[in-house]
Amino acid sequence: MENEKKTDSREWELDAETEYRFELDPGTSLAIKLVQGQAEVFGTELAEGKQYLFGSECKASVFTWQGCVLEISHPSTEYVSEETPMATYANLHIAFEQMRVRALNAVHGSPNSDDDSDANAEPPRVLVLGPENSGKTTVCKILTNYAVRAGQDWSPLLVNVDTSEGGWSCPGAISAAPVHSPLPTCSPANPLGSAATSAPTALSSNALLPLVYWYGHTETKRNPLLLDRLIRNLGDNVREKYDADPEGRASGIIVDTPSSFASSSSSSSSSDHRHTLIKSCVDAFGINVILVVGHEKLNVEMQRTYGSRLSVVKIPKSGGVVELDHSYRERVHNYQLRTYMYGQVIEAPPGISSATLGGETMTDLVLSPSSVVIGFDDLTIYRIGEESMAPSSALPIGGTRILSEMQPVLIDPAQSGSGLLNAVLALLAPLNPNDSERYDEEILDLNVTGFLIITSLDIQSRKMTILAPNQGSFAGRTAVVGSFEWQDQ
């Protein structure tokens, strides 16, 4: 075993302010051990002597400020780079840290130091924009992890409105959670770490309780009106939270966005949707800093639109960002849905006996979902708007939609072409019994309590089989279906 380990692992010595980058092929895994020195993965420090496991086609890097020695099992692609944007990201963190301190002093009524007496006492509320494959999520993780590591008990609110990524839950969702401990990186199936809704809460990295809303599609242009409403719902909840917790508010907000917010399109309607959704984020979360990752034209555009009332800062894109194709993204969605149901399972490389996922023991991240047979009438299922809706520009002149893009449409599972077999459903929180008035679109304003998969439909018996991560009754509950499907293979 010892010889096998020596054969499969080798040491890399990194100079100060360099980073080791790696990419994994499907079905492979990688173990990294910090032998000596200091090192971090996207802002999360590695503990010396501990094996860290990576899998599911993970693409990441290990950065060191002071130099280090790493022991690494053989990956698919690897190299060391001396050119990194980490100094810029660290300077941003320092600026945001000063904003947090001033905001907390204002809450406590403490005077600020003389050199910043005229400075604004607002905490950083940051919107991160950038094109596809620019590393926006990595920037968000680094800034969040640095804030958590600052030793000031900060718990910044990390918001994910990138529906193609899904954040802590499933692809198709938008979510927000206050982060109390560094977010690990071990797999693209958990880009922001695991949440307590689908993983053991005994683990610090899983003790997150995100607020989740369901959009149900990868593309923002599919139903921008719905996404706009959900972003504003998320913002309303954040405002309520911070009205009751002014100290927590001082930690600030970091918002990760989809690449479609940055892509300029020849279609005027797409461009309008893009600007509307950026404005939704700015308004909903009270944004006071916009970071533009490596995109000159977008930076000029944001300066022109928002530069007079908030800070717009262009930051460099890391040279380590990997170009991801459509098939890779589809495989990641499959990893995410499987991980949501079964937990994170990554086989250690040959010769590695004990390794951890993001610092947590591997066996703790295995789940046993339950398969339940229920009647068609037990669960009320809706789809928002028509399944395939022509754009407004394609309607006849003077024509209007018969069905609104925001209209919940009841689905009968017994009807042929219901599209429910293998569909991902978002289980909604119950309606508030204290609300005397009901309205048609009320379910759009309900957050998500979990996700289900319909694995079989028995139309003759009017029964369906549902896969869920937790056991429980679904009688009388409401769910919404989007365009995601998943088959357990």
Image: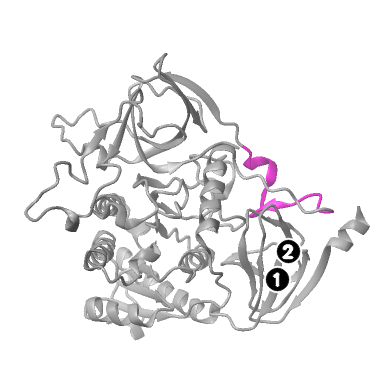
- Magenta-colored stretch includes residue 487: no
Query: Mark 1 and mark 2 in contact (Cβ < 8 Å)?
Result: yes
Q: Specify the amino acid type for callout 1.
A: Glu
- Magenta-colored stretch includes residue 354: yes
Residue at image point 46% right, 46% down: 169
User: In the figure, 101 relative to 368: above or below?
Assistant: below
Residue 350 located left or right of residue 160: right
Residue 227 located left or right of residue 202: left
Applied colour scheme? one colour
The quarter of the picture where residue 322 lies is bottom right
**Mark number, residue 78:** 1
SS category of the residue bearing label 1: strand
The quarter of the picture where residue 220 lies is bottom left
Question: Looking at the image, which residue sits at the far left?
Answer: 398
Q: Specify the amino acid type for callout 2.
A: Pro
Which residue lies under the disc numbered 2? 75
Residue at image point 24% right, 62% down: 273
Residue at image point 22% right, 77% down: 305
